[in-house]
Amino acid sequence: MQETRKDPPGREFLPRHVGIIMDGNGRWAKARSLPRELGHQAGSKVVGNIVRHCKKLGIPAITVYAFSTENWKRPQKEVNALLELLRRFLSNMEEYQRENARLRVLGDPSPLPPDLREAIVKAQEGSKDNTAITVNIALNYGGRAEILHSVKALARDCAAGALDPEAITEEDISRRLYTAGQSDPDLIIRPSGEQRLSNFLLWQSAYSELVFLNVLWPDFTPEHLNYALHQYALRDRRYGGV
C-alpha cells in the first residue's frame, strides 16, 4: 500500500495537534545487524525533520513519545543510550531558538538523573516565549500514570475543601494533566506496523484520529507525515454525533 505523499493537504484540513508514537528503532537496527542503541540514534535524527515539517505546514503542536514509564524495564545499556539522546536533544537550545519552538516535557521527571531534570527546566524556561510551534516530549510518560497524577491532585483539592467532589468535571481532570492548557491531539500516528496506543495520551486521545503506517521510525519522512495528514483530512469527525 502506498504510504507516502509528496504534497500535504490544504491548511484548512490540517490538525492542530499531532501525536507520534516513535516506534521501530530496535527493529530497524536488528534488520541491519546493529546494536539497538544505534537504532535509537537514527530515530532521534528524524525528530527534527518532522518538527520542522509540521512548523512549515503551520501545525501548532506536536507530541512525540520519547521514553515511557515502561521503558525502564529495558536493558540498562539501552536505557542509558536513550537518556543520553534525550539529554542532547534537550540541551540544543540554539535549535529551539532558531526554529522559534517552545519545548514542553510531559511526564514525571523525579526518577530521572539530576542533570537531565536540570536540562528539562532550562529547555522549558529558555523556550517558553517561542511561538511558532509547541514541541511536547513525552519523557518518563505513561497515560495511566498521568491520569493517576490528575486524580491525586483532585483528591488533594477536595481534601483541602477547594473542590466539591460532586462538582468535578472533565475539564477539572484535563486541567491537572501534563498537557494542561493545550488542545487534545487531533491525529495520532504510529509507524512500525503496530496498531495500539501503548499507554500514550489515553485521556486526550478519546476522539483522536489514528493512522498506523508500515514504516519503521528511522525511515519516517515528511512524505510519510503528508500521507497520514491526507488520511486525517478524509476522516469525518462527528464526536459522537451524526
Image (cartoon, helix red, strand yellow):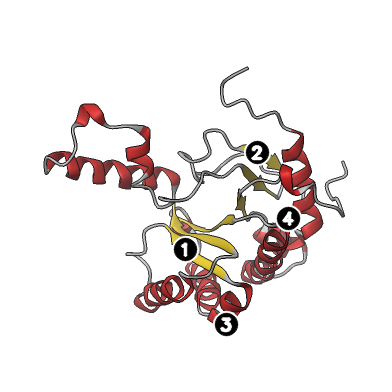
Residues under numbered marks 1 and 4 in contact, where contact means CB atoms less than 8 Å apart: no
Q: Residues within 10 Å of mark 4 (few under 14, many from 20)?
A: many
Which residue is under mark 2? 210
Task: From this view, report whether residue 148 is shown above or below residue 86.
Answer: above
Residue 94 is tagged as: 3
Task: From this view, report whether residue 43 is shown above or below residue 171.
Answer: below
Earlier sequence position, callout 2 versus callout 3: 3
Residue 216 is tagged as: 4
Q: Position of residue 231 (x, y in %)?
A: 76, 39
Mark 4 residue element:
loop
Earlier sequence position, callout 2 versus callout 1: 1
Cα distance in 3D space between marks 2 and 1:
23 Å
Cα distance in 3D space between marks 2 and 3:
33 Å
Earlier sequence position, callout 1 versus callout 3: 3
Residue 104 is tagged as: 1
Looking at the picture, which amino acid does disc 1 mark? Arg
